[in-house]
Amino acid sequence: MRRAGLSRRLRFAAFLLLSLLCLLLLGMGGFMLVEDVSPVEALYLTIGTLTTVAPFHLTEGGRVFAILLILSGFGLVAATAAFVGNLFLDGQALELYRRRKMRKELGKHSDHYVICGFGQMGQIVTAELMRNGVSVVVIDTDEQAVLRCRELGAPAIRRDAMEEESLAEAGVERARGVISVVNRDADNVFIVVTARALNPEVFISARASSRGVEKKLYLAGANHVVSPYASAAMRITQNILRPTITDFMEQAVSGREVELELEELCIPESAPFAGKSLMESNIRNDFDLIVVAIKRGDGKRIYNPASLEPIHAGDTLIAIGPRANMDRFHKSLYGKPRPASNGGQPIPG
């Protein structure tokens, strides 16, 4: 409704400005004909007459024309000035400028993540992705949430993420993934359906707060569903049963407090060891990394692979080792420096 109201006001403003332009052209033509002056002088006389701020020495015919011009145009000038002033004072023009500027900025985004919802989970996800150098765009209906998001330096749209236009404006067609973490499960399902319709290939991760919603989200098109309560309960249980392992894995995955990192890398066709065994790849000897698992292109997982296990192009290696060594391995594998994070998916070759 607000967007429709803004469009109507802008159309009315365009009508007023067009009418004012026609009035200026009419005044210029009249003064050029009656007073026999140049176009610049005629424009000066027209503006001065309409604003009643400049004294003129006119002929009798010029005075009659000036009176008619004032009677017919002064109301239009006053209405235009009042409308434009009110448009700026109530923030509508500023909102339009911000929206256009944001749309222009979002048009440059690609291979980013669209985060729907900037609540507690959305804030954590946004901060972590940005900390790891991943490009994000946030959608939320709350003005304060959008302001907090912009303070972090992330582009944000104050709109309903369930609307198709909102996801399109956030660049979902060019996005690498969509993360739906709004509070209501029904809204998450609708967002997943809409995002999947706009981009059939995009990776979608969604939040499920209630039992049984996970199945609906998967049916709607989500690739990955997270239940924060179930995950929190499992983490509490693991902290009690296996506290050392839990702490180690958390620190290795986050990369904050230890020099070890757990990383996943997709093997490209150009990899020098594609088609060779794990032992022949010399990953352990050359880079001091441990391959803890291999995920085949067909989804099959091999944990603690043997030294004679072959590595094929398209496989995903799960490796752990020092951060500096992981950086060297990535550069050797892809020929370019490793980004700060892979954003939760295998790094493409």
Image (cartoon, rainbow, N blue to C red):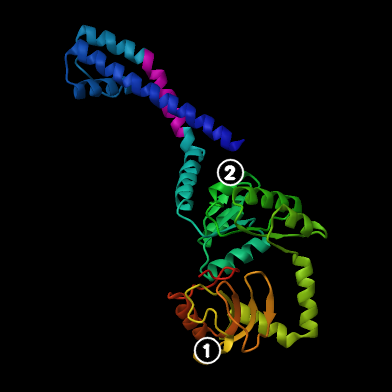
Q: Identify the mark at residue 282; answer none if there is no mark.
A: 1
Q: Quadrant of residue 347?
A: bottom right
Q: Residues within 10 Å of mark 2 (few under 14, many from 20)?
A: few
* Real-space CA distance between mark 1 and mark 2, rounded to the nearest whole angstrom: 50 Å
Q: Say which residue appears at 56% left-offset and 50% top-offset.
A: 157
Is 2 one of the magenta-colored residues?
no
Tag 1 secondary structure: loop
Q: Residue 348: where, in percent of width, then height?
A: 53, 69
Q: Position of residue 318 (x, y in %)?
A: 61, 79
The image quarter containing residue 69 is top left
Quarter location, residue 131? bottom right
As rendered, which of 231 and 158 lies closer to the eye?
A: 231
Task: Indicate left or right for 238 with 199 as reference.
Answer: right
Q: Which amino acid type corresponds to the residue marked 2 in the rendered image?
A: Glu
- Judge whether residue 40 can be spotted in this image: yes
- Which residue in the rendered view is the most extreme toward the bottom? 285
Q: Is residue 77 magenta?
A: yes
Q: Which residue is mark 2?
A: 165
Is the residue 159 above or below the residue 281 in the image?
Answer: above
Residue 259 at x, y = what percent?
56, 86
| Above-or-below relation of 11 to 65 | below
Q: Quadrant of the N terminus?
A: top right
Query: Magenta region, mostly helix, strand or loop?
Result: helix
Region of the chain picked out in magenta, as a range: 72-85
